[in-house]
Image (spheres, helix red, strand yellow):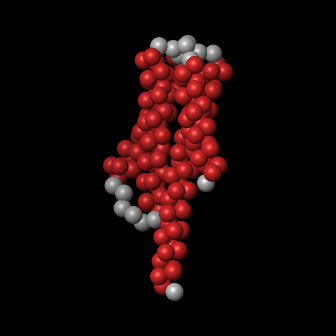
C-alpha cells in the first residue's frame, strides 16, 4: 500500500515540480497540468470499471468505453504536446516518465484501497457470523 502511494506522489510531485521550474508560458503549464489531472481521474475510472466488471457489478458500456477513451485521449494529448514542445529530449522523457508513474500510482492506490475495504468488510462479516 505504501509503495503505491509513494509511486503516486512521486509521479505527481515530480511532474508538478518540473512544470513549476519549466520555462514555459503559463497556458502551456496549465495544459500539461490539466492533462495530468484528467489522466489520473480517467485511469482510476478505468481501474474501477474493470474491477467492477470482474466482480459482477454492472457497468454500462458507455461508461466503460468513455473511461478507456479518456485514458487514451490523455496519452495522445500528452504525446502530441511533448512532441511539439520546445523542450530537450531529456525534459520530454522526464515529463513522460513522471506522468506514467503518476498514472500507475493512481491505479495501484485505487486497487489497494478497494482491496483493503473488501478485506475489512469480509472481516466484519466473519466476526458477525462467529
Q: Can the viewer see residue 72?
A: no
In this view, 7 is above or below 87 = below
- Left or right, 126 with respect to 69, comes to right
Measured as percent of width and height from the top left, residue 129 is found at 48, 85
Q: Nearer the viewer, residue 99 or 14?
A: 14
Identify the residue at horizontal 60%, vertical 48% (top origin).
Answer: 4
Figure disc tally: 0
The N terminus lies in which quarter of the figure? bottom right
Q: Nearer the viewer, residue 121 or 81?
A: 121
Depicted 8 relative to depicted 31: above or below: below
Say which of 53 and 8 sits in front. 8
Up the image or down, 96 lies above or below 109; here it is above
Return the x and y of residue 87 as percentages of the image width and height.
Answer: 59, 15
Q: Considering only vertical position in the picture, is 104 above or below 26?
A: below
Q: Residue at x 55, y 56 (%)?
A: 112
Residue found at x 48% / y 33%: 36
Q: Which of these two is toward me, 122 or 31?
A: 122
Residue at 37% x, 44% y is 66
Amino acid at each position: 500500500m505504501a509503495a503505491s502511494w509513494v509511486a503516486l506522489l512521486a509521479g505527481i510531485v515530480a511532474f508538478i515540480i518540473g512544470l513549476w521550474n519549466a520555462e514555459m508560458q503559463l497556458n502551456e503549464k496549465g495544459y500539461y497540468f490539466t492533462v495530468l489531472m484528467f489522466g489520473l481521474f480517467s485511469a482510476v475510472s478505468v481501474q474501477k470499471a474493470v474491477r467492477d466488471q470482474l466482480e459482477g457489478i454492472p457497468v454500462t458500456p458507455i461508461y466503460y468505453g468513455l473511461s478507456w477513451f479518456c485514458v487514451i485521449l490523455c496519452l495522445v494529448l500528452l504525446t502530441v504536446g511533448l512532441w511539439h514542445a520546445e523542450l530537450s529530449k531529456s525534459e520530454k522523457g522526464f515529463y513522460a516518465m513522471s506522468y506514467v508513474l503518476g498514472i500507475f500510482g493512481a491505479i495501484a492506490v485505487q486497487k489497494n484501497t478497494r482491496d483493503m475495504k473488501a478485506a475489512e468488510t469480509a472481516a466484519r462479516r466473519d466476526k458477525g457470523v462467529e
